[in-house]
C-alpha cells in the first residue's frame, strides 16, 4: 500500500518560475517516492508504484542508465552507486522488454580500474540487451549549444543521449567539497566531456542547473542505501546507512529531498542552501516544495 508520509520542504517566497518544462509543472509531479531496502526488490516496487515511472520503460525502449561509477573505490565507500540498485534497474528494464539498456559514465578515475572496483561489470551479466560503456573517446560526445544558458554556452554531451528513448539517472547521495552535496543534477556532469569547465569557467551551481536544458532525465533514482556524509566526492569519509532509495520524475524534488538525509560535512542543509537546487527551481526545471510517499 502507498501511504502519504507528509508534506516536506519549503518554497522560496517570491521566486519567479522560469519557462515551463516537463518537470514539476505542478505539485502533483513533484512527488518523491521512497522505498526501503532490500534493494533487490525496492526498484521494482518503486517503478510499479506510479504510472509516472512505469510508462517510461516499455516494449522496445532504448534505455540509458547513468549511475555514478566515477571513482576507483569499492561500493561500501558510498562514493559510487550501489551496483545492486543498478542491476535491479537493468533487470526491470529487461522484464519490460526494453530493446537496449546502456549503462554509461565518464569516469574521473581510470575506466578499467573503476569498472573493477565499483563492481560495474556485474550489472549487465546475463542480460543480452544490456551493455556497459565508459565514455572518454572524442567520438563518444557531440557538441550542443546552450543559448539559454548564462554560463557555459557550448558543451559536448554523450552521443548516446540522442539515441535513448528514456534516461534514468541513478546517483549516489554524498557530500561534495565544491557543491556541498552531490545528488542527481550533479551526477549528470558524468555525461559531459569537459567537467573542468564547470569548475574553472562558470558559476558551478548555475552551470549544473543549466545542464537540464540539454540533458533531461525521465526518472531520477537517488541511492541512499549508503551515503557519504563527509569528505566527498572521493572519500574515504563517514559512511551512513539510511537504507533508502528515492525516486521522482522531478529532478529538483529528488535533490531537495536528498538534503534531509543527514548532516553533510557536519552541516544541516535545506534545499535553499544548495545553489544548483535553487537555480534549477528558479529556471522551472522542478520544485523545491515536494511531497514524499512511502512505497
Image: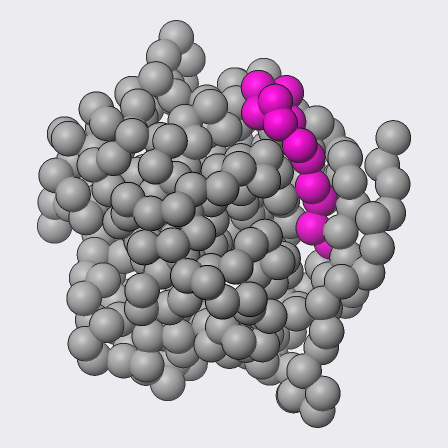
- Whether 5 is drawn above or below 130: the answer is below
- Whether 52 is drawn above or below 14: the answer is above
Report whether 190 appears left or right of 23: left
Report whether 237 appears left or right of 116: right
- Res 255 visible: no
> Within the image, what quadrant is residue 97 found in?
top right
Give the residue displayed 39% in from the left and 46% down from the top: 238
Give the residue displayed 24% in from the left and 42% down from the top: 71
Report whether 56 appears left or right of 86: right
Q: Position of residue 43 (x, y in %)?
A: 61, 28
Marker count (numbered): 0
| Span colored in magenta | 31-42
> Within the image, what quadrant is residue 271 found in?
bottom right
Q: Could you tell me which quadrant the N terminus lies in? A: top right
Check the image and name the residue furthest to the bottom: 14
Q: Is residue 49 magenta?
A: no
Q: Position of residue 245 (x, y in %)?
A: 60, 38
Amino acid at each position: 500500500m502507498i501511504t502519504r508520509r507528509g508534506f516536506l520542504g519549503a518554497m522560496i517566497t517570491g521566486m519567479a518560475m522560469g519557462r515551463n518544462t516537463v518537470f514539476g509543472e505542478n505539485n502533483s509531479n513533484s512527488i518523491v517516492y521512497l522505498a526501503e531496502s532490500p534493494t533487490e526488490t525496492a526498484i521494482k516496487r518503486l517503478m510499479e508504484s506510479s504510472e509516472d515511472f512505469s510508462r517510461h520503460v516499455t516494449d522496445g525502449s532504448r534505455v540509458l542508465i547513468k549511475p555514478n561509477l566515477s571513482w576507483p573505490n569499492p561500493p561500501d565507500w558510498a562514493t559510487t552507486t550501489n551496483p545492486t540498485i543498478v542491476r535491479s534497474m537493468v533487470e526491470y528494464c529487461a522484464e519490460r522488454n526494453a530493446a537496449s539498456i546502456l549503462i554509461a559514465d565518464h569516469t574521473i578515475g581510470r575506466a578499467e580500474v573503476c569498472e573493477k572496483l565499483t563492481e560495474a561489470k556485474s550489472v549487465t551479466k546475463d542480460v543480452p540487451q544490456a551493455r556497459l560503456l565508459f565514455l572518454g573517446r572524442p567520438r563518444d560526445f557531440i557538441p550542443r549549444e546552450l543559448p539559454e544558458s548564462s554560463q557555459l554556452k557550448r558543451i559536448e554531451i554523450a552521443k548516446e543521449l540522442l539515441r535513448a528513448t528514456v534516461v534514468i539517472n541513478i546517483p549516489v547521495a554524498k557530500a561534495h567539497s565544491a557543491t556541498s552535496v552531490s545528488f542527481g543534477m550533479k551526477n549528470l556532469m558524468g555525461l559531459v566531456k569537459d567537467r573542468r569547465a564547470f569548475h574553472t569557467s562558470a558559476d558551478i551551481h548555475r552551470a549544473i542547473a543549466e545542464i537540464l536544458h540539454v540533458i533531461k532525465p525521465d526518472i531520477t533514482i537517488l541511492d541512499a542505501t549508503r551515503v557519504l556524509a563527509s569528505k566527498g566526492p572521493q572519500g574515504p569519509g563517514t559512511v551512513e546507512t539510511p537504507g533508502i532509495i528515492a525516486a521522482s520524475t522531478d529532478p529538483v524534488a529528488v535533490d531537495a529531498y536528498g538534503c534531509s538525509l543527514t548532516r553533510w560535512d557536519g552541516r544541516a542543509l535545506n534545499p535553499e542552501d544548495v545553489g544548483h537546487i535553487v537555480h534549477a527551481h528558479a529556471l522551472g526545471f522542478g520544485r523545491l516544495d515536494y511531497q514524499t510517499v512511502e512505497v
